[in-house]
Image (cartoon, rainbow, N blue to C red):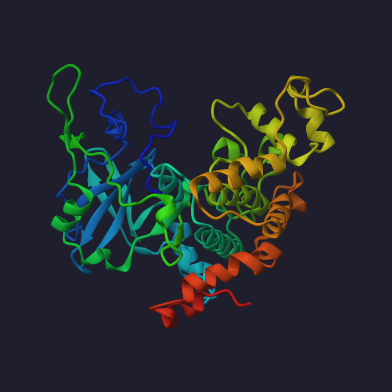
Amino acid sequence: MAFKTFSSSADSGPLPFKYVPIEEVERLEKYQPGGYHPILIGDILRSRYRVAHKLGYGAYSTTWLCRDYQSNTYVAVKVGTADSNDREVDVLNYLNHSTPLDHPGRTMIPSIKDRFVLHGPNGTHPCYVTTLAMCSVSSAKEGSYKRIFQAMTARSLIVQLLLAVEYIHSKGVVHGDLHIGNILLCLPADFDQLSIEELYEKYGSPASEPVIRFDGQPLESSVPSSVVPPIWLGKASEEFSLPESRVLLSDFGEAYRPSTDYRYNSHAPMSFVPPEARFESECGLSFSADIWTLACSIWIILGQRPLFEDILATPDDITAEQIDTRGNLPLRWWEKWAARHKYFDESGKPNQGRQVRSWEDRFEKHIQLPRQQAGIQGFDLEEKAAVMNMLRSMLSFEPEKRPTAQDIVKCEWMERWAIPDFNKSHLGGAGAADNSRDAVPP
């Protein structure tokens, strides 16, 4: 699961403010029937999991760092709102128990260690216990001034992400929400050796803030007496070494099986949404939609900024950037796009005075230049050509022209540059024998 330290649009809905706002915590008004379950630091869940800190929150859950007294390890416990469903845990259970057991991408899917329900003043809450992670790729970048991964680390992260996608696609599952906030980086093996007191000493104690009603009245039982901002277990992106670059693909709440489920909308971040979700949603989305969002994720792992800029952008701005980068839209989409004249003339040429950034320009300014400025290795001309060829194919406007995940594993950039670095990270040094099954064969 991705441990989000921000609220989604669903958090900031029409609920009126009832409590004094507190920064970096979940929307307090969602502690109501159907909403969050009130949890305090020190609580014991299911007579087994001691709540040590908060990991994050989203529209339909809070996630907690807990000490499992039975296994003597740290785990992540995701507590759903009373109106949430079990779709994510059902998908993960299916992927955890599917064959083949030796597919390297299978190890990059979080394992479900336990599931249970909590009964409280706001209803019955589905809960599940899963692997604890350090941070997301997104938060590692946000925790860095340079916002860049070392070249070898970036290559290894991309291979693991691709293998995870190849595995879930082989099982008939589309992730539906691929982006770097849902790509988690694993903790070191010795993390479980920390006592809770040592955890606080190293990462900081929970900074509890009292919950106060605006009207000064006492709190109902549906609301916790205090809340805490999430703990930060991560580090800056450039500090991740090759052996530390181990990935879990998380947040399967939007996952679906195209053979039985029909999806017409993408819930990925706006700059990641595949164009068919906008122009041909009636046809439904499938595995090719993941390939588009995978390409957008690969781009930002390689560089510093997203391929399509989303700051203050509208969906029409993103479409214009996609055309600037990848060329003309399919004619049926072009004719359907009412706002095209704002950006292009009828022949498809950019309107005079509009700044247009080509694919080449974006690669230099988003990837190569930031690496040079940060003193971090970039990519030579031969590798650059190979990675650009791969991404171009993944970003074909026509969904059926995009390669499959299995195809991408076999492309030149993967075979010559990325997979060798991945194999070094999984086979080199201590524990090589244990990790040999995770390597990608030449």
> Residue at the right extreme?
347
Q: Is residue 72 above or below residue 116?
A: below
Q: Position of residue 432 (x, y in %)?
A: 43, 80
> Residue at the top extreme?
215
Camera sees residue 265: yes
Q: In this view, does 257 lie to the left or right of 48?
A: right
Camera sees residue 178: no
Q: Position of residue 232 (x, y in %)?
A: 30, 47
Q: Where is residue 389 in the image (x, y as percent from the top left)?
A: 73, 54
Q: Position of residue 416 (x, y in %)?
A: 66, 68
Q: Is residue 187 left or right of residue 73?
A: right
Q: In this view, does 250 lie above or below 314?
A: below
Residue, x 55% and y 25% (percent of image)? 312
Which quadrant holds residue 66? Answer: bottom left
Residue 121 vs residue 425, the one in the foreground: 425
Which quadrant holds residue 405? Answer: bottom right
Q: Look at the image and tell me in which quarter the C terminus lies.
A: bottom right
Q: In this view, does 316 lie above or below 394?
A: above
Residue, x 59% and y 68% (percent of image)? 419
Residue 161 vs residue 214, the one in the foreground: 161
Which quadrant holds residue 342? Answer: top right
Total numbered badges shown on the rendered structure: 0
Q: Is residue 387 left or right of residue 127?
A: right
